[in-house]
Image: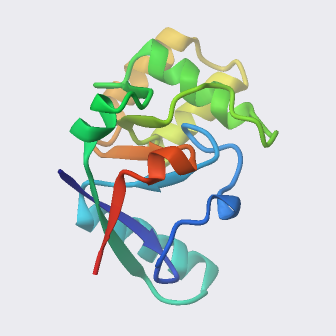
């Protein structure tokens, strides 16, 4: 079991995927972080920026072994790579409600602000994919995110009270 955390300005009793937004790193879905402090830092930044609510971190347990055993389609990016960058760019460009992949769960590096800036430079054709990877390997965060795409995947999360 892996403990994961989600930062929000509201406590989460159950996950509502309809509140998810398009154009995120791995697509429209529910995102968590294995690092409590990282989740708290992220939500504090958002709450301060929007001046709305208070920072709340909700914790879950994820049984990845059971999810794999039961056949969930899980994609793991071990580090920043060309494949990861193309995947993130494709998802960020997707403004539709339809996912562009068939993964139930995606695990991989976070495209934080410094990485996000480099991705925008790549999307605007200022740098090549190779330059993008070089830049994000230098500037990128070591933080990992867990993405849950659908109700089937969410069944493997257990809310921690």
Q: Position of residue 16 (x, y in %)?
A: 61, 65
Where 110 sits versus 17, above or below?
above
Q: Quadrant of residue 157?
A: bottom left
Q: Is residue 121 visible?
A: no
Q: Quadrant of residue 140?
A: top left
Q: Is residue 97 visible?
A: yes
Taking the view exactly as shown, the residue that stands out farthest to the bottom is: 53
Where 87 sits versus 60, above or below?
above
Name the foreground residue: 151 vs 121.
Answer: 151
Where 97 sits versus 99, above or below?
below
At 43% across and 35% down in the image, what residue appears? 106
Q: Position of residue 6 (x, y in %)?
A: 40, 65
Name the foreground residue: 70 vs 81.
Answer: 70
Q: Position of residue 113 (x, y in %)?
A: 49, 49
At 52% across and 81% down in the image, what residue appears? 9
- Residue 42 in the figure: left or right of residue 104: left
- Residue 122 in the figure: left or right of residue 45: right
At 46% across and 83% down in the image, what residue appears? 11
At 33% across and 38% down in the image, what residue appears? 67
Label count reads 0
Name the foreground residue: 64 vs 70.
Answer: 70
Q: Quadrant of the C terminus?
A: bottom left
Taking the view exactly as shown, the residue that stands out farthest to the front is: 70
- Residue 32 in the figure: left or right of residue 120: left
- Residue 102 in the figure: left or right of residue 31: right
Name the foreground residue: 17 vs 70.
Answer: 70
Taking the view exactly as shown, the residue that stands out farthest to the left is: 1
Q: How is the image coloured?
A: rainbow
Q: Position of residue 24 (x, y in %)?
A: 61, 44
């Amino acid at each position: 079991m892996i403990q994961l955390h989600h930062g929000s300005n509201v406590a989460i009793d159950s996950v509502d995927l309809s509140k998810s937004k398009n154009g995120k790193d791995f697509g429209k879905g529910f995102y968590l972080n294995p690092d409590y402090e990282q989740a708290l830092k992220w939500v504090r930044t958002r709450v301060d920026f929007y001046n709305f609510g208070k920072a709340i971190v909700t914790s879950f347990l994820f049984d990845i072994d059971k999810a794999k055993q039961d056949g969930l389609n899980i994609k793991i990016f071990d580090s920043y790579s060309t494949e990861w960058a193309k995947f993130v760019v494709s998802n960020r460009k997707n403004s539709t409600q339809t996912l562009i992949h068939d993964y139930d769960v995606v695990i991989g590096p976070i495209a934080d602000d410094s990485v996000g800036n480099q991705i925008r430079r790549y999307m605007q054709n200022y740098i090549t994919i190779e330059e993008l990877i070089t830049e994000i390997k230098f500037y990128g965060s070591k933080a990992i995110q867990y993405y849950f795409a659908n109700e089937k995947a969410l069944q493997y999360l257990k809310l921690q009270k």
